[in-house]
Amino acid sequence: MADDTKPPFAGGMLVLLTAGVALATFMEVLDISIVNVAVYTISGNLGVSRVEGTMAISAYSMASAVMQPLTGSIARRFGEVRTFGASVLLFVVFSSLCGLSRSMTMLIVFRLCQGAVSGPMVPLSQTLLLNNYPPQKRAIALALWAMVVVVAPIFGPIMGGWITDNYNWSWIFFINIPVGAFALLITWSLLRKRESKTSVVKVDGLGLFLLAVGVGCLQFMLDNGNDYDWFSSNIILTLALIAGVCLTFLIAWELMHDHPIVDLYLFKRRNFAVGVVCLFTGMFAFFGGTVVLPNWVQEVMSYTATWAGFVVAPVGIPAIFMSPLVGRYQHKFDMRLIITCGFAIFAACSFWMAHFNADASYFKLVLPRMVMGCGIALFFVPVNQVILSGLPPEKVASASGLSNFFRTIAMSVATAASTTLYAHRGIYHHARLAEHTHMDARATSEWLSRLQQLGLPDRATYAALNQLVNKQASTLAINDVFWGFSLIFGFAMVAIWFAKPPFETTAKAG
C-alpha cells in the first residue's frame, strides 16, 4: 500500500498523472488489436503464411494473459510504482525490437516478451489512479481508466490499417516509443516517492508453472482454433486437454497453498465474483459483435478493411464523453440500476442489429453502434467499481489483475466463438436457401431468365445465383449471432442484481 503520509494529487499534477497513466494503458491495450489488420502485410514481407503470421498476435495475448493474474504478487515483491515503471520501459524496448525484426521468428519472440512485460501495466494503472486520486474523485478515476480500456481495442484496427497502408508495418510498433517515453517520464517523476510497501513473497513455483502452461495453451487454442478447424485438429484437442488439466490442478493447488500466486479467495467476496461474471459476460457479447461485424461488411457489402473499422469505431465516441459523467454522478444512483441500463442498451442494440439486411446503408450500420456507445459507459465504468468495492488496499492490485485477466480471456473467447458461430450459421443458412433455389422454383427460374436475357452465359448466371445465396446466408448468420448476444446481455441484466451494496472502494490515497 502506498505511503499514507502523502496527500492525494490535485490540479495540474492530477491531470499529468492521469495523462501519463492513461497513455500507458491505451498503448498496451491498443497493441492487442492494432496488429490484427497488418497480419497479411507482415506475413508477406517476412515470407511466411498467414497462419504463421497470426502467431505474432497469439504470442502477445498469450503472454499478457499469463502475467495479468500475477500482478498482485509481483507488485507486493517489487512495489507498485517500480513494477509499473519497469513494465512501461521494457514494453518500449520490446516494441522497438518488434519493429526492427526481420524474420517471423524474431517478431514472435519479441512479441512474446512484449506481452509478458505488458501484463501488469493495465491492472497497476487502475491501482495507481485509485491510490493517488482524492477519495471523492476515485469514481472519476475508474471512469477514465475504463474509457481507455474499452475504446483502445476499437480504434486499434483503424490505426493499424492506416499506418500499414501509408507507411511501413514497423511503425505500428515504433509509435509506442514516444508514447511510452512520455508516460514513463510523467508517472516516474510523480510517483517515485510514493512507492507501495514491499515484502518478500515466497514464489509458488508449481502454481506459476500450472498458470503459464494452462493459460498459455488456452489462449493459443482460442486464437488459432478457427484456423485448425477446432477439435477436428489433434493440435487443438491436445492444447484443450493440457489447458483443462493444468487449470483444474491450478485451482486446487492455489486454494490449498499458504502463499498462492493467484488469490482465488477473492471470489469468496460476493461483489467481486458477481462483478467479474458480469464483466466477462458483457465483454464477451460486446467484443464478439465488434469482431464479427467487420467480417460481414467486408464479405457481403465489399467494404475495405479501413471502412469496416469506421463501421465499428463510432461506438467509442459516446463512451468518451459519457464515461467521465457516469463516473462523477454514479454515486447518486444504485450501481446495479446503472449497469442494468447499460446491459439493456446493449441488448436493445444487438436486437436492432439482428435485423440488418444486405442493402443496409452506412448510416443504418453505424447508428446502433453509436447508441451502444452509451451502454459502454453505463456498463464498464460502474462494474469495475462493483468489482473493487469493499476490498482492502493491499488486495486492489491482485483484484485488478485477476479481473483484467478475465476481461482478456473474454475477448479471446468472444473472437473464437463469434467467428465460428458466424461461419457455421452461414453454412446452415446456405444449405436451407439452396433448397429453395432449384430450377423448378418459379422465382429462381424467372431470376435466371432475366440474367440470360441480358446475354450472360449459363455458368455466369449460376455463379451470380450462388453469390446471391452466399450474401443472404451470411446476412442471416450475423442476424443469428446478434440474436444470441442480445440474450446474453439479458442474462447479465439479471446477474448484476446478486451484487450487494455498498459499492465504495477503500483504496487509500498515496
Image: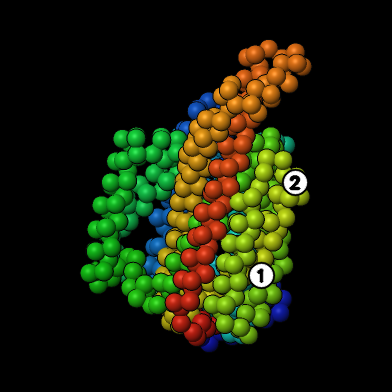
What amino acid is labelled 1 in the image? Ser
Secondary element under disc 2, as helix, strand or loop, is: helix
In this figure, which residue is indicated by the disc labeled 1?
A: 323
Q: Nearer the viewer, residue 350 or 255?
A: 350
On the image, the x and y values in percent for residue 296 come to 61, 41
What amino acid is labelled 2 in the image? Tyr
Q: Few, some or many C-alpha atoms within 10 Å of disc 1 (few <14, some 14-19, many ≥20)?
A: many
Residue 54 vertical placement versus 92 (above, below): above
Q: Is residue 63 left or right of residue 282?
A: left
On the image, the x and y values in percent for residue 247 come to 30, 56
Q: Is residue 96 visible?
A: no
User: Could you tell me how far apart the alpha carbons at marks 2 and 1 are, in whole angstroms?
Assistant: 26 Å
Say the numbered circle drawn on residue 212: none
Q: Is residue 73 left or right of residue 29?
A: left
What residue appears at the point 34 percent right and 69 percent down from the top-left corner? 264
What residue appears at the point 41 percent right and 34 percent down from the top-left corner? 228
Say the numbered circle drawn on residue 362: 2
Q: Nearer the viewer, mark 2 or mark 1?
A: 2
Q: Nearer the viewer, residue 131 or 240?
A: 240
Q: Is residue 93 left or right of residue 447?
A: left
Q: Quadrant of residue 229?
A: top left
The image's colouring method is rainbow
